[in-house]
Image: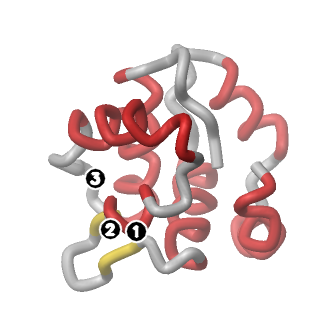
Amino acid sequence: MDLFKNESAVCHNETYVSEETIVRFRDDEDFEGTQELGCYLFCIFREKNFWINSRNELHLTKALEIVPVDFEQQALKMGLKCLKVKGDDNCARALWYHNCWKKSSPAHYFLI
């Protein structure tokens, strides 16, 4: 997504996640991702200042601020379904958010 172009470049260089992994995660409902993808997604959250370090979780309100107006209601519903984050580290937790969003509304999921 163009909203994350700068962060995407930084995070690709930091995590070495392949473009194929990102595309497969976006397009394959059954593919739950990899550790590298989780670290890439965490990097995006961190670079956009969407991560609350003291709680090791996403700042949902900040993330929703950049959602396009026509997608706000659906994004809010997806976010509310995914409040109880799981994972042993920030990479796993970031991947968990994306998996939860993807499963809660596959037709509306898009990968950052």
Judge left or right: residue 56 versus residue 4.
left
Number of residues whose C-alpha sits closer than 10 Å to that of mark 3, classed few (under 14), some (14–19) or many (20 or more):
few
Q: In the rendering, at what x and y percent does residue 1 appear?
A: 76, 49
Q: Nearer the viewer, mark 2 or mark 3?
A: 2
Task: Return the residue nearer the eye: 27 or 110.
Answer: 110
Kindly check if marks 2 and 3 are in contact, taking CB atoms under 8 A apart as contact. Answer: no
Q: Which residue is mark 1?
A: 62
Q: Which residue is mark 3?
A: 87
Instruction: Identify the residue shown where x is 55% and y is 60%.
Output: 66
Q: Which residue is mark 2?
A: 59
Kindly check if marks 2 and 1 are in contact, taking CB atoms under 8 A apart as contact. Answer: yes
Task: Return the residue nearer the eye: 14 or 77.
Answer: 77
Q: Amino acid at mark 3?
A: Gly
Q: Amino acid at mark 1?
A: Lys
Q: Nearer the viewer, mark 1 or mark 3?
A: 1
The answer to whether residue 53 is above or below residue 34 is below
Secondary structure, mark 1, is: helix
Secondary structure, mark 3, is: loop
